[in-house]
Image (cartoon, grey):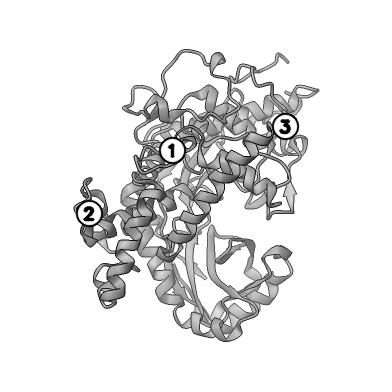
Amino acid sequence: MVYSNYLSGKKKKKKTQHIKDQQFKTSCVMEVDKMDENEWKYHGEGNKSLVVSHVEHSQVLRFLKYPAEEPGKSHKAAKEAFGHLQNIVDFSKNVMKPFLGENYVHHGEVVHLPLDFVRQLSLKVEQERPESRCDKVMDIFSGYALCLPNLTKLQTCHFSESGPPLCIEIKPKCGFLPFSSHVTKDVKHRVCRFCMHQHLKLANGKWKRMSRYCPLDLFSGNKQRMSFALKNLLQEAQNNLKIFKNGELIYGCKDDKDCLQDLNELTQHLKPYFFPANGLIHGPHCTRTVINELINVITTALLSNSGTCRTGEIRKLHISEGRAHCDASHFHRDILRKGHCGLPKDCVLSKILQAQMLDNVDIEGLHPLYNRVEQYLGEFPKERIKLQIDGPYNENCFEKLRNSQSEDDGTVDYAVRKVQQYRVAMTAKDCSIMIALSPCPDDELPEPNLVIQTSKSRLIYSVSILDLDPKPYENIPHRYKLDGQIVNFYLKSTQVKQDPPTPNLFMDSEDCTLVLHSV
C-alpha cells in the first residue's frame, strides 16, 4: 500500500516542519493487488460504521454497516454505499470545514477495495468486535470505504517520535442553553440537555451511574470550570471521554458494558509523558498530580488557536450570562475566582459552539418548519432534489446556510434553510474532539505554536474534529419526540427525589489549578 502523506526513506530534520492541510487530504493510492488484511486491525465502531487502522501507517478505513438479519437489504444498500460515503465526504469538506476551520477537519476520500480483501478483513475483525455491536455486519458487498488519517496520531507535524502517541477524545455535546422563544418548558432555559438526559439514560439502564459532567462548564472558557468538567469526565467517562495510547484504548468505554476506568492504572500510562525522568513523582499524591497535569494540557489545547498556543489577547466569544450556566451543574459558582470568561474566538471549542448555535429555533420551533417542508414535498416530490434535502453538499450549501434570513416569511425556502441549519448544528453537537500528544525530543526545535510546555516536559500536539456526518433529515420527528421525553422525565424525577451523591475523586470546592509537590 502506498500513501501520499507517508514519508518513508527520508532523513528526518531536527526542526519540525509544519505540514499543510493539503498534505493531509488522505489521498490513498492503493496497490489493490497487494492488499493484506493482516496489515489492518480493528479500531472501533459506532452505530452505522466500523473502522480499522493500519498497523504501520497513520491511516484508517471506515466501512458502512447493515443489519445482520436482513442480508437482502444489505445487498441493496451496498449498491448505494458509494453515494452514501461521498455525501459524508462532501458534507465534511464543503459544509463543516468552512464552519469549523480547515485546520480541524480532515474529510478523507472514498476508495474502492478488492472484495476478497474486504471479506477476509471482516472475518479477521469479527472476533474483536463488542458483542453489543454484532447486530450489524460490515459492508462486504460494495468494496467501498472511506479512507481517513488516524486522528489518534499527530496531524500537524512530522518529526522523530520519542514514544508512542497519546490521544484524548472528547465528545463535548451541546455547550449552550436554548434561547428560542419557541421553547415551551422553562426548565430548558435553565438546565442543559445533557444534564437532563442523564436522568432518562440512568432509568433506561444505558449507564449505571449519573455523570456530573456539564458541557456548559467545558464551553465556559473559564479554566476553573473547564478543569471541573474534565475531572468529572474522568470520573464517569461514559461515551464522552476516551484516551488512547499508540492507537489502543487505555481509558474509557468501548461500549455500554466494557469500560476501562482505573485512574491509578491510567496514571502509570501517563507518567512518562508528563514526568519523563523515573522517580520524579511517586506516593499517594501521584495520581492527583499526574491527572492535574493531564487536565492542564487538555485545557490548554482546547483554548488554543489553531495557529497559536497563546490563549490570551485574543478576541473571545461570549455567551450571555443567562445561557452560560446550567442549574444542574455541580460547580459551585461561589468559588469562582474573578477573571476573564469566554472562549478565544478561533479555538476548537469556539468553532464548535458557533456551529451549534445555528440551532436558534430549538427543536420545538423547527418541528413545524419540518412539517411545512414535508407537506410541500408530499405535493411536489420531485422538488426534493432541487431543494438538496439529501445533498449533494456542494460549495453553495455553506453560503446558503451562513446567509439565512432570521424572519420567517412563510416560504418553503425559509423552512428548508432552517432545517439544514439545524442538521449542521446537530452534527456539531455530536462531534468529537481529538487531541493528539507526543513527547518532544530535546534536540527537536518545533514551532512554538505546536508545543505545550508542562512542568517537566514538552509535548507536541494537534487538535482535530471527528464524527462530522450529516444527521438524517428523517430523524427530526424522532428528535422532537425524544426532546419531550427527556424534559418530562427530568421534571418528574427531580420532583420525586434529589440526585444521590456521586463519589468524587476531587473535592467540589478545591482550587482546580495545577498542584505540584516538592520532590
Q: Say what amino acid the circle numbered 3 marks.
A: Thr
Q: Quadrant of residue 448?
A: top left
Left/right placement of residue 431 relative to residue 121 reads left
Q: Who comes first in sequence, dot 1 or dot 2?
A: 1
In the rendering, at what x and y percent does residue 33 appear?
A: 53, 82
Of badges 1 and 3, nearer the viewer stands: 3
Q: Say what amino acid the circle numbered 1 marks.
A: Leu
- The answer to whether 110 is drawn above or below residue 351 in the figure is below
Residue bearing mark 1: 349
Question: Marks 1 and 3, Cα distance to the nearest angstrom?
Answer: 27 Å
- Estimate how packed mark 2 is, as few (under 14), some (14 to 19) or many (20 or more) residues with alpha carbons within 10 Å: few
Image quadrant occupied by the C terminus? top right
Secondary element type, mark 1: helix
Q: Who comes first in sequence, dot 1 or dot 3?
A: 1
Secondary element type, mark 3: loop
In percent of the image, x 41 and y 50: which residue is there?
A: 363
- Residue 101 seen in render: no
Q: Say what amino acid the circle numbered 2 marks.
A: Glu
Q: Nearer the viewer, residue 214 or 245?
A: 214
Q: Who comes first in sequence, dot 2 or dot 3?
A: 2
Residue bearing mark 3: 502
* Labels in figure, total: 3
In percent of the image, x 51 and y 24: which residue is there?
A: 223
Tag 2 near tag 3, CB within 8 Å:
no
- The answer to whether 312 is drawn above or below residue 74 in the figure is above
Secondary element type, mark 2: helix
Question: Marks 2 and 3, Cα distance to the nearest angstrom?
Answer: 46 Å
